[in-house]
Image (cartoon, rainbow, N blue to C red):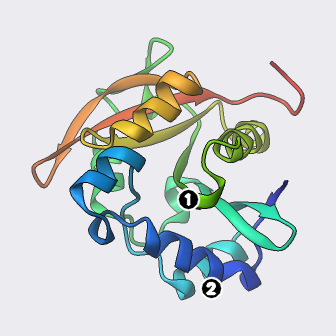
Amino acid sequence: MMYRWATEADAPAMAALFAANHRDALTERQRDEQGFVQGGFDAATLRAMAAAGTLLVADDDGQVAGLLALSGADDLPAPPPPVVGLLAAQDTLRWEGRPLSEVRWLLYGPVVVDAAYRGRGVARGLFTMAVETAAARADAVVAFIESTNRPSWRVHVDGFGMRPLGEYVVDGRTYSAVAAAVRAPGGA
């Protein structure tokens, strides 16, 4: 498996992967078992994000096995409601004793792994690349997890050790902000 920055040519495969795992495309049982992603990420949006250098992919000999967005809040021209809520909550969310608003951070996510590749370390590989490549621009990567997305919590908090910063509510849905420290490539 190779982990790399996405290219514009990856957009159709990334859009198909995103659509297959979108919250609205899954049954409640599927969401409970495998988790889900949110937002409007069509091929044109993903192509633009790849051109801007904000997407990482897991590449299995030309097959997109997973993707992860890694961007600054200023990189998003029209942030979705959960990101707007996260930005609004920065003064109440705390990272290492400081309000998140005083920390250099990048938005981590969405992250999605193709069903055929789950359980094979793809999400961990994307996470590792994210925290290493973010080191030049940030002190932490920050994600939001909807309270009903227990699989994402298990992967990111229980599995990768991301730390909860607090909760916020947007449109009646509760989200937890979680973060991980960035590290230099090869660092612990």
Name the quadrant containing residue 115.
Answer: bottom right
Residue 54 at least partly seen: no
Nearer mark to the viewer, of 1 and 2 = 1
The circle drawn on residue 115 is: 1
> For numbered disc 1, what is the local secondary structure?
helix
Q: Amino acid at mark 2?
A: Pro
Which mark is first along the chain, 2 or 1?
2
Can residue 19 be seen from the camera position used here?
Answer: yes
Q: Position of residue 81 (x, y in %)?
A: 27, 60
Q: Position of residue 159 (x, y in %)?
A: 56, 26
Position of residue 1 measured from the top left corner of the image (x, y, whole percent): 84, 54
- Mark 2: few, some, or many residues within 10 Å (few <14, many ≥20)? some
Which of 30 and 172 lies nearest the eye of the viewer? 30
For this orientation, the residue located farthest to the left is: 172
Q: Which residue is mark 2?
A: 12
Above/below status of 76 relative to 44: above
Residue 102 in the image: x percent, y percent? 48, 29
For the residue pair 102 and 184, the one nearer the viewer reads as: 184
Mark on residue 9? none
